[in-house]
Amino acid sequence: MGKLKTKRGVAKRFKLTKRGKIKYTMGGKSHLASSKKAKRLRKLRKRSLLDNKTAAKYFKRMLPYG
């Protein structure tokens, strides 16, 4: 049996934690920052965990080797 292919776009945007949760960086920080509040930009710096179970299952299928 052949190897499973990883979706490269997903691999660049999402990482699996040790316990199998999906970690990602929120979008909306790269440009037009002058019109955004400082509090909002600080919150966008942090990585967040994906809490949608259906989406997590979908992304895990696209990242077969973590």
Image (cartoon, rainbow, N blue to C red):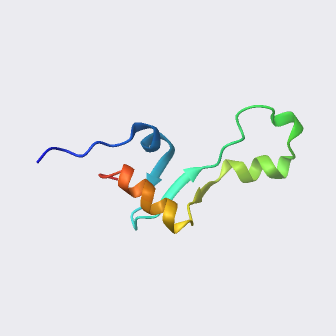
Any part of residue 16 in sight = no
Position of residue 66 measured from the top left corner of the image (x, y, whole percent): 35, 53
Closest to the observer, 7 or 13: 7
Image position of 24 (left or right of 3): right
Q: At x 45% / y 44%, what residue is drawn?
A: 10
Image position of 22 (left or right of 63): right
Position of residue 13 measured from the top left corner of the image (x, y, whole percent): 51, 43
Toward which corner of the image does residue 51 lie, by quadrant? bottom right
Badge count: 0
Residue 55, above or below 38? below
Closest to the observer, 38 or 13: 13
Residue 32, above or below 63? above
Image position of 48 (left or right of 35): left
Can you name the residue that lies furthest to the left here?
Answer: 1
Q: At x 55% / y 51%, what residue is drawn?
A: 24
Q: At x 42% / y 43%, what residue is drawn?
A: 11
Q: At x 24% / y 46%, what residue is drawn?
A: 4
Position of residue 9 measured from the top left corner of the image (x, y, whole percent): 46, 38
Image position of 58 (left or right of 43): left
Position of residue 47 measured from the top left corner of the image (x, y, whole percent): 60, 54
Residue 30, above or below 27? above
Any part of residue 63 in sight = yes
Closest to the observer, 20 or 63: 63
Closest to the observer, 29 or 6: 6
Residue 36, above or below 49? above
